[in-house]
Image: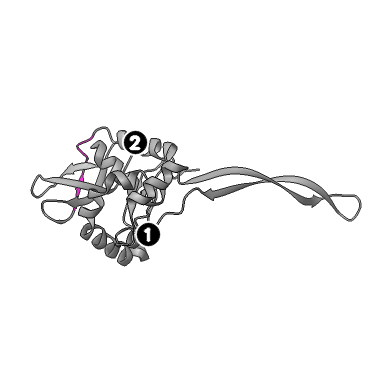
Amino acid sequence: MAIHSYGYIPAQDDKLTRDKDFAAFTHGLDRILANEDQILGCPDYFFTPLSFAYCSWPYVGGSGPLCLGYLLTGWKDGLFMERCPHCEGPALVTSFGGSPLSGSNSWTGYCRHCKKRVSGQDSQHKPFSKRIDFVLRLRKTHPEVEVFKQKFEGKEFSWGGDGTKQVTKERTVTRRLHNPVSLEELLTDNVQPDACVDASREQ
């Protein structure tokens, strides 16, 4: 029997949405970078979902969507930066994938010099496992959800009585820890990162 393992794959029918979101993201990138510290300090902004940002690899857990805060942290660290294949300028990586066994990988991002989406093979950051470990640490230190066991009263089959008996069971519950704003909300003038940071410090 063969065992197959696959990494995260975004829904193919969402490509138009991803392209639209990527265009909005690059259009507002200067504002995002200007407010980097405030966004990193506010969970609701940190976890802003990006439909076009994700990582993928088989065999090891942890691949999946990348929120805005993960990208900003990776750019700041330098591990999510590449050289543009066209102009050698700085390219901000927004998605990547590869194999933890062979090390082969690819990436997609945005070149700040060319002002367009770019992609490449085999990251300059080797081995590829560095990026995997980085994402796994981010998911551990900056979790978006909490997973826990919850007990509840239920019934199960019994040979006696009415055919059932009362038992205590457990179920896995996933709870979202924050209320992330959308990219559209983040880029509007209604969002004030400074106020969010001040509020988080008071708690």
In the figure, 17 relative to 133: above or below? below
**Image colouring:** one colour
Q: Amino acid at mark 2?
A: Phe
Q: Position of residue 46 (x, y in %)?
A: 37, 48
Please tell me which residue is depicted at 20% across the width and 52% down the height of the picture: 110
- Secondary structure beneath dot 1 equals loop
Q: Is 201 on the left-hand or right-hand side of 87? A: right
Q: Is 154 on the left-hand or right-hand side of 53? A: right
Q: Do we see residue 150 in this rendering?
A: yes
- Secondary structure beneath dot 2 equals helix
Q: Do we see residue 60 in this rendering?
A: no
Q: In the figure, residue 12 lies in which quadrant?
A: bottom left
Please tell me which residue is depicted at 89% across the width and 56% down the height of the picture: 162
Label 2 to label 1: alpha-carbon separation: 24 Å
Q: Position of residue 27 (x, y in %)?
A: 21, 60
Q: Nearer the viewer, residue 48 or 19?
A: 48
Residue farthest along the left direction in this orientation: 87
Q: Is residue 36 magenta?
A: no
Q: Amino acid at mark 1?
A: Ser
- Which residue is label 2 attached to? 134
Q: Which residues are magenta?
A: 118-125
Q: Is residue 120 magenta?
A: yes
User: How many labels, in total?
Assistant: 2
Q: Position of residue 190 (x, y in %)?
A: 33, 62
Q: Is 4 on the left-hand or right-hand side of 38? A: right
**Nearer the camera: disc 2 or disc 1:** 1
Few, some or many residues within 10 Å of mark 1 (<14, 14–19, 20+):
some
Q: Which mark is residue 68?
A: none
- Which residue is label 1 attached to? 182
